[in-house]
Image (cartoon, grey):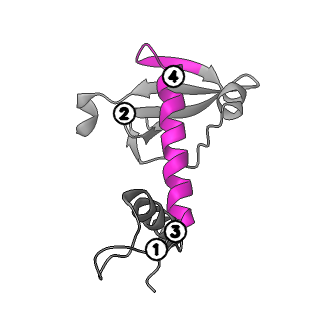
Amino acid sequence: MRKCLNCMTELQGRTDKKFCDSHCKSSYHFEKTKKETPMFFKEVDRQLKTNRHLLKAFNKSGKSVIREQKLLESGFNPKFFTHYWKNQKGDVYLFCYEFGFLKKKENSTVKYILIHWQHYMYT
């Protein structure tokens, strides 16, 4: 007897049939892919997306300043970024796709300057 690879029910119909329906086929391949995909890649990808989302949410005007504590408490991790840009003063902005950040210390408060990628930054 042939059985569905996902739910193990007896199959009816064609001799080369592997799944009882499209739901079982989809579920089987989803679970298989979940096991094969490296977890490190997923964690990095998830953090980059979280960082981008937070930078976008806190930077509505194109350039803004936020306290480090507030950004970190929201789930931001500054160790994950996609690229960088160095301005004429020598400051290095780290970017998560089109949203950038620069860590600055003013008096005893640590803040992040948030910016949006501009066309002049390509040079």
Q: What is the x, y in percent for residue 78? A: 59, 43
Q: For numbered disc 3, what is the local secondary structure?
A: loop
Q: Nearer the viewer, mark 2 or mark 1?
A: 1
Please give the range of residues in magenta.
38-65
Question: The disc labelled 2 sits on which kind of residue?
Answer: Gln
Q: Residue tagged by mark 3?
A: 38
Q: Disc 1 and disc 4: Cα gap in Å? A: 46 Å
Question: The disc labelled 4 sits on which kind of residue?
Answer: Ala
> At 45% across and 18% down in the image, what residue appears?
63
- CB atoms of marks 2 and 3 within 8 Å: no
Q: For numbered disc 1, what is the local secondary structure?
A: loop
Q: Nearer the viewer, mark 3 or mark 1?
A: 1
Question: Residue lying furthest bottom in this view?
Answer: 1
Q: Residue tagged by mark 2?
A: 88
Q: Residue tagged by mark 1?
A: 4
Please state which of residues 20 and 123 is positioned toward the viewer in this rendering: 20
Q: Earlier in the sequence, mark 2 or mark 3?
A: 3
